[in-house]
Amino acid sequence: MSVLRTALVVTVLAGLTPLQAAPPTARRQWDLSPFSWLRRSPAEPGAPPNSHPLQVSPKALEEALGSVMVASPEGDEHLFDPNESAELSRPLSEALAVTRPGEDIQLVSTAKRLGAISAYALTVTARVFVVEGKLNLLVHDARWDVAFAYTLTLQVPEYKFGSRTKASPVVLKAEGAERRRPDWLLLPLAAKAPTPATTPAPTQIVPPTAAPASSPSLEQRFLRLKQLREQNLITEEEFAKRKQELLKEI
């Protein structure tokens, strides 16, 4: 076996392989639920090129995401619970395989947990990209009130995803990770991979403009509240409380 072939096999086994020529794709968003999705987006102005496109195994991504802890007044807890990390890993692997050097990945993930931050659904918003074999995770929000507020207004929240130049109040840590800032971790995926021989030109992605939403009717708000309870995104107590508030408007 040649030296070049041996090196390639070792890199593949490590779970991180540079793509010499990424397959063309127009896909830019991976939807998991109304409050959980990943989307390709232009990198921030002035950001250096990322190590994209890149093949990373879902298992390596699941382990990296699962290692991240977030601070709260009651103590540290996992930023993503085990099921959440597993659910995010495959679409994130697919996204990294087609994302260009001039693009980042915007991540929104909402999952119900009973940790220190909240007994309700926790929504995490983050900017994700890979540079030199390390998964960069910039978290802007770890909030429990996003899905909760939607039960009353039915208005899609305005998300922010973390910035290379401006820190958020979130405090993260993970064993074995480099901490660039309290809200910015560099999570190791494998040894540094060789730079692809050819790098495709960045593709300009224009995010869609959301149409103005009309005020939801009382009936729509009842139906949405019921749906959130059935999806286990709010507790039975919160469901009953909000139901009584809506009944007062009749």
Image (cartoon, rainbow, N blue to C red):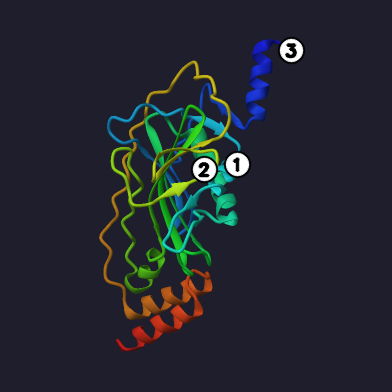
Please report the residue visible at 31 percent of the width from the left and 77 percent of the height from the top: 217
Assess whether mark 2 and mark 1 are in contact (beta carbons under 8 angstroms): yes
Q: Quadrant of residue 181?
A: top left
Task: Point out residue 120 in the picture as x, y percentages from the top left corner.
Answer: 47, 69
Counting residues from the start of the chain, the first of labels 3 and 1 encountered is: 3
- Relative to residue 99, is residue 204 drawn left or right? left
Q: Nearer the viewer, residue 16 or 207?
A: 16
Assess whether mark 1 and mark 3 are in contact (beta carbons under 8 angstroms): no
- Relative to residue 216, is residue 101 drawn left or right? right
- Crowding near pointer 1: few (<14 within 10 Å), some, many (20+)? many
The amino acid sitting under disc 3 is Met
Point out which mark residue 58 bears.
1
Circle 2 sits on which residue? 92
Distance, label 1 to label 2, CA atoms, is 8 Å
Point out which mark residue 1 bears.
3
Q: Tell me the quadrant of the picture where the N terminus can be found.
A: top right
Which residue sits furthest right? 1
Q: Secondary structure at mark 1?
A: helix
Task: Point out residue 150 in the picture as x, y percentages from the top left corner.
Answer: 36, 68
